[in-house]
Amino acid sequence: MPAGATTGPGAAGSTGTAGAAGTSIYGRTIDPYRMKAREKAAEAPPACRLIPVPRAGESIGGEKRVGEKVDSDEMADGNETGLSFTYQQQPIELNRDNLEPDNNSITGKVQAELSYENETWLLKDRSDLQTTFLAVAENTPLKDGDIILFGDRKFIFRLSANEPGSGSGSG
């Protein structure tokens, strides 16, 4: 028998042969339905959801919350529907109309822009008053000029004069 030859699937010393897409034809079943589902998922454009966090007294899933702080983990565990957005090779403009029509604190023009690059969702503030903020739960890179909201007070992040890329400034 030639080297690498086998007497059947799973034979002792069998190395198998490479099948389509690098899968072994021995010892593994290829499910064409699962393969088709994977291919379809890979072809689908990226999508995301924005889920409104309820304020005190607002209802979530029919349950009224009165003066209760809602944890982000609790929101992630629920069956909330939220707003769905699918990236179609152009930034998605977010405004009052497609976020929350009755909320006058969201601009009717363009509040922010969602985009998708290098398998990462990006958010950019586009509001005239720069009122788009992001709550961070992990280390997040800061750039000179970034605005940080602590409570209801905004702070501008500036690099010290001795930091690279800081330009001039008082230390």
Image (cartoon, rainbow, N blue to C red):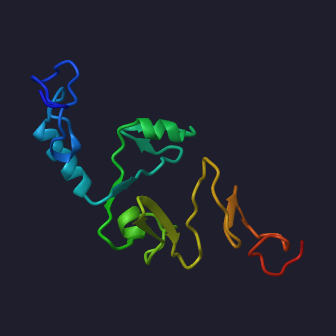
Q: Position of residue 87 (x, y in %)?
A: 32, 65
Horizontal side of residue 112 vs 28, given as left or right: right
7 w.r.t. 41: above or below: above
The furthest residue to the right: 171
110 w.r.t. 9: above or below: below
Q: From where the camera sits, is residue 152 visible?
A: no
40 w.r.t. 94: above or below: above
Q: Position of residue 124 (x, y in %)?
A: 51, 70
Horizontal side of residue 95 vs 165, given as left or right: left
Closer to the camera in the image, 52 or 135: 135
Q: Quadrant of residue 135?
A: bottom right
69 w.r.t. 55: above or below: above
Residue at 36 percent of width and 69 percent of height: 97
Residue at 20 percent of width and 50 percent of height: 39
Residue at 71 percent of width and 71 percent of height: 144
Please identify the quadrant where the N terminus is shown. Answer: top left
Callout count: 0
Horizontal side of residue 3 vs 150, given as left or right: left
Q: Quadrant of residue 47?
A: bottom left
Horizontal side of residue 43 vs 97, given as left or right: left
Closer to the camera in the image, 5 or 163: 5
Q: Position of residue 121 (x, y in %)?
A: 44, 60
Residue at 15 percent of width and 45 percent of height: 20
Closer to the camera in the image, 16 or 123: 16
Please identify the quadrant where the C terminus is shown. Answer: bottom right
Q: Position of residue 122 (x, y in %)?
A: 47, 64
The furthest residue to the top: 12
Q: Quadrant of residue 50?
A: bottom left
